[in-house]
Amino acid sequence: MSKRYTITAALPYTNGPIHIGHLAGVYVPADIYARYQRLIGNDVAFICGSDEHGVPITIKAKKEGVSPQDIVDKYHAIIKKSFVDFGITFDNYSRTSAKIHHDTAQEFFKTLYDNGEFIEEVTEQLYDEEANQFLADRFVIGTCPKCGNEEAYGDQCENCGSSLNATDLINPKSAITGNVPTLKQTKHWFLPLDKHEAFLKEWILKGHKKDWKPNVYGQVKSWIDDGLRPRAVTRDLDWGIPVPVEGADGKVLYVWFDAPIGYISATKEWAERVGKDWIPYWKDENTKLVHFIGKDNIVFHCIIFPSMLKAEGTYILPDNVPANEFLNLEGNKLSTSKNWAVWLPDYLEDFPNQQDILRYALTANAPETKDNDFTWADFQARNNNELVAIFGNFINRVIVLTNKYYDGIIPEHSEFNNVDEETLAAVKAFPAVIASSIERYRFREASQELMNLARLGNKYLADEEPWKVIKEDEVRTKTIMYVALQIASALATLSEPFLPFTSAKLKTILCHSELDSESTWSDVSSKNILIPSGHQIGKAELLFSKIEDKTMQAQLDKLEASKLANEAANITVEPQKDTITFEDFTKLDIRVGTILEAEKLPKTKKLLVLKVDTGIDVRTIVSGIAETFTPEEVVGKKVTVLVNLAPRALRGVESQGMILMTETPEGKLVFVNPDSKTDTTNGLQIS
């Protein structure tokens, strides 16, 4: 009996194209899972859509000098086309600007509002006086109070993954003007997560959710153990879904209230289009709801959205949330702002008709339990050493030999020997083994089991050597080729979730469509005959081609060029300061000192605390050089010190002067001292 699955993939922000981090973290594993469930006969609604609200979109619009609607229209089209071209088989890819979504989200809010599920509070929030607006979420940048990351956003620290409020940040600045914001009162509606704490403990901690991935369960448990607090569901913005109650002028639904409801509205849209009832997919307890997300979205899908669904009262809760960790790129963190990424549209252009290579490389190296690193060298090795040398090599030999010996007609087999029977029995075991890995969301493991099936085929051919046996025993050769063709047919079926384009091409070569019935997943495990004697197959075609070093070097060169272009674009030249008189200059007391002691200032990236002998005293100076020098490197250094600068407290330490620095022509920060032969044409810096 078939089961019903509602499978969701995180809604991507429409402020840029999809990159490999998105694919590895969410969309490839979700597509593998959805394709597999369809293959075994289950009823699947695979749902996604563009997240078109939220601060990142308004920031992008401001930078490009266009409207937010222009931004979402542009990137929605790019993202949707990329998913189609890459073979992601969403049953519906919607967008949160659609009327059906606005109506669904407002109806959901109104239901909770009418049921008294919100609390209304007047709070102080950060406000940019120059921009004349409240600073929600990513309109604020500051220091994370938990890990000290100085580039944390007002909703989340991407360094430690902590979910934040803008007012939590240390030294906050407006992302719009760079100004230090003020506090101003405003009214908002909050979802009291503390009210749902007992339910979440029962459902997750005491319930059956220990089968969730350790990274997901651990993060959720930590949140619950720390105690939950009310979470705002509205924002002061001019872009988003208007709050549908009186007294909410100028307020919109917070994007993390609005976005997950997009799964529901997209399901409604799909059901209406195909003539189905959407309700069983969200309200029938027999439906299995699975959310595919990245680790930065765990709290929203495991705590906030379930609390929303529970408060509404008629919806099912997620059965599993198999979140992945992050994918890095060539040793560095993927960054859209720094353009350090492999963008899907670029990949599709640079590697036409080679979608499956990237799908396989990302799956085989998926960040399922820890952050992993994508390198072009690994991509090349996965293709050349596995797809070409194992999978492609086996298929090519089988098809070539069948056409050479039998004009492409599957031969009649004679009696199977022990090796044949063991090989065919081993083939039958693969569907269950691969399925077990997929059902446990171990897609890396599943992909390697698929490759093991191809290895089995290669070993069988290498051991049985039909190219030698045919000279002495044509009857035995026919049996060998018959068995090898059964393995090839099994690969055509079982590879579909992982390598859909390859699967389709292989099925075409094997002329599967001309069989009385194409092999199903269960057929591979239960039938002795997947492709019968007398069946005509096609000519050999290479499934994969070797990738040369120069192709990989071109990609590395592109990354380096992108990095340099980004650095150049972000260089800011400070304007000349106001003119001073000679008398002003003579007031500076600059002396040569020696650094006696140095240590890193805790919870900062840039600051060292120095003890400096200035010749007149030993004083403490806090200097922003920790990213260039270690404490051990600077002890004993001669330095030039501005000694008559008024003391200033930096992170609780009083700094009693400033160290003069300069940059070399290569951009390296160095000390200015009497013995230095450094070219100081780049000018002095004060640290």
Image (cartoon, grey):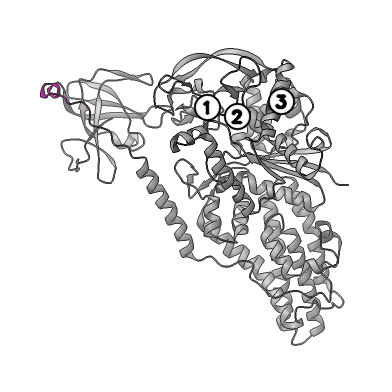
Residue sitting nearer the eye, 530 or 34? 34
Could you tell me residue 449's position as x and y percent?
Answer: 71, 57
How many numbered markers are drawn? 3
Q: Is residue 370 above or below residue 162?
A: below
| Dots 2, 1 in contact, CB < 8 A | yes
Q: Which residue is mark 3?
A: 108
Element class at badge 3: helix
Identify the image quadrant of residue 357: bottom right
Amino acid type of the residue tagged 3 in the rendering: Phe
Per the model, the C-alpha gap separating discs 3 and 2 is: 14 Å
Mark in the foreground, 1 or 3: 3
Question: Could you tell whether 415 is left or right of 292 in the image?
Answer: right
Residue 531 in magenta?
no
Q: Can you tell which quarter of the image residue 48 is in?
A: top right
For disc 1, the marked residue is 137
Residue 477: percent from left, percent from top = 78, 80
Residue at 70% across, 70% down: 459
**Disc 1 and disc 3: Cα gap in Å?**
23 Å
Query: Pointer 2: residues within 10 angstroms few (<14), some, or many (20+)?
Result: many
Answer with mark 2 or mark 1, whichever residue precedes in sequence. Answer: 1
Please, what secondary structure does the residue beneath circle 2 have?
helix
Q: Please tell me in which quadrant of the rendered image residue 481 appears.
A: bottom right
Q: Nearer the viewer, residue 26 or 458?
A: 26
Q: Is residue 128 left or right of residue 593?
A: right
Q: Nearer the viewer, residue 310 or 388?
A: 310
Span colored in magenta:
577-587
Quadrant of the image for the C terminus? top left
Is residue 580 magenta-colored?
yes
For this orientation, the residue located farthest to the bottom is: 472
Disc 2/disc 1 C-alpha distance (Å): 10 Å
**Residue occupying image coordinates x 44% and y 42%:** 338
Q: What is the three-letter code of the residue carrying label 1?
A: Asp
